[in-house]
Amino acid sequence: MADLRVKAAGLELKNPLLAASGCFGYGREADPVIPAEIFGAVVTKTITPAPRRGNPPPRLAETLAGMLNSIGLENVGLNAFIDEKLPALEGLDTRVVVSISAASAAEFAEMASRLDELPRADALELNLSCPNVAEHGSNFAADPAAVLEIGRTVRPCFARPIWIKLSPNVTDIAASARAAREAGADGVTAINTLLGMDIDLETGASPFARVTAGLSGPAILPVALAAVWRIAREEGIPTIGVGGASKLDDLLKFLAVGAAAVQLGTVLFTDPAAPARILRQFGDYLDVRGHADLDSLRASWKEPA
């Protein structure tokens, strides 16, 4: 049987599938239908220094090949996360990556310092790219200088791996990845949601209070693949692929373009059986082709031109 273990951006994982931030709660909410232990790691809902109520409803809308969301980083805040949510993950047989967002480099660093004291936080994912909060994320991810400043400020504050989540809503995502690498990040996560919107034909207006929202799901897979390919090819920093993956072929495509591992997001809402099925099929795929592990599979592929 093939060995599915992988080292991804400084973190040893038992398999290359992760639960994406914002799609798996704080790590235990989905246990009745999707046990957290099935993943190589779970990335928590993004945490901010203080609690956030998020955007007013409606917050979700289906599209032809995906989903629009305008959650607005609703979360319990760092104190409650440390006191109530993180202890529930003790003993969990998978890695825990804590997603954080803040309004300044100093706030990011303060959060990282507090989480550094807690061994259950196996890695941090710095969310610099949420499109649904005006004072957070989108401005940082669009500016490589801001990515560099935040990364350099946080790096001394957290001893374990740090990933920086990048936005596709930029002209040059490779420049942001370069800044993350120069800042000392162990890896980047690419991509976050694309900026999109919908119209309610009864009113002629957007259903969302913020008008635009973040598009996820199968529609954005080609954009995510291109981003991961470019980052891997031009910058060489380990990249966690995310965006539209929902089946075995999608996992394989991400790995082929250079992803170290792959996060599942929107599919967890629509097909809770997907993670177990993909991992089973992936093991069979490797066995049938005579690959003992992921390194053997990667060595068998030509690099995309």
Image: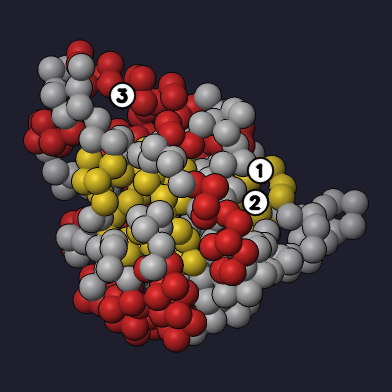
Distance between the alpha carbons at the discs numbered 3 and 1: 28 Å
User: For residue 301, which quarter of the picture?
Assistant: top left
Image location (x, y in percent) of residue 281? 35, 19
Q: Earlier in the sequence, mark 2 or mark 3?
A: 2
Residue at the spot x=51%, y=31% of the render? 35
Q: Is residue 148 left or right of residue 55?
A: left
Q: Earlier in the sequence, mark 2 or mark 1?
A: 1
Query: Residue under circle 3?
Result: 282
Query: Residue under circle 2?
Result: 68
User: For residue 73, which quarter of the picture?
Assistant: bottom right
The answer to which of 203 and 112 lies nearer the viewer is 112
Image location (x, y in percent) of residue 253? 30, 37
Query: Residue under circle 1?
Result: 63
Image location (x, y in percent) of residue 18? 40, 42
- Amino acid under label 2? Leu
Q: Residue 243: which disc?
A: none
The answer to which of 112 and 254 lies nearer the viewer is 112
